[in-house]
Image: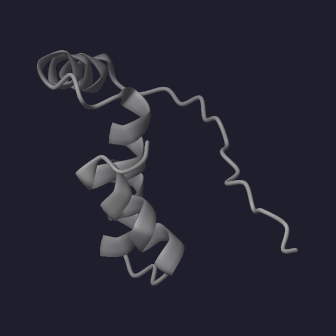
Amino acid sequence: MNPVTVPVTVSLMVEIPEDLHLSIQDYLDAHELWSQERMMQAALSLFLLQNGVNNPNVNSLYLDSLFGCAA
């Protein structure tokens, strides 16, 4: 029997400009299917992909968050 691998998550606390925070809140208020976690996962994984990270797990996280398969 193979052990089941449970995805590990890490919490981040970051300071961002208030204008960015307000824009995020406006977006989330208008798009009820998106959460702050899902939006941050999509944004961070896209940043990594655009900057040369070639990791299948990051690719999968980006696509999952973009299409709502995981968050």
> Which residue is situated farthest in the front direction here?
1
**Quadrant of image for the C terminus:** top left
Residue ID at (48%, 79%): 56
Q: Residue at x 21, y 22 (%)?
A: 32
Q: Residue at left 35%, top 28%? A: 35
Percent coordinates x, y for residue 45 in the rendering: 40, 60
Is 47 displayed left or right of 4 in the figure?
Answer: left
User: Is 13 on the left or on the right of 32, as rendered?
Assistant: right
Which one is nearer the viewer's eye here, 29 or 64? 64
Q: Count of labels shown?
A: 0
> Is the image coloured rainbow, by chain, by secondary structure, or in one colour?
one colour
Q: Quadrant of residue 63?
A: bottom left
* Location of residue 50 with respect to 47 vertically, above or below: below
In the displayed structure image, the side of residue 3 where residue 9 appears, left or right: left
Q: Toward the viewer: 62 or 7? A: 7
Q: In percent of the image, x 67 and y 42: which residue is there?
A: 10
Outermost residue toward the left in this view: 30
Question: Depth check: 58 or 7 in front?
Answer: 7
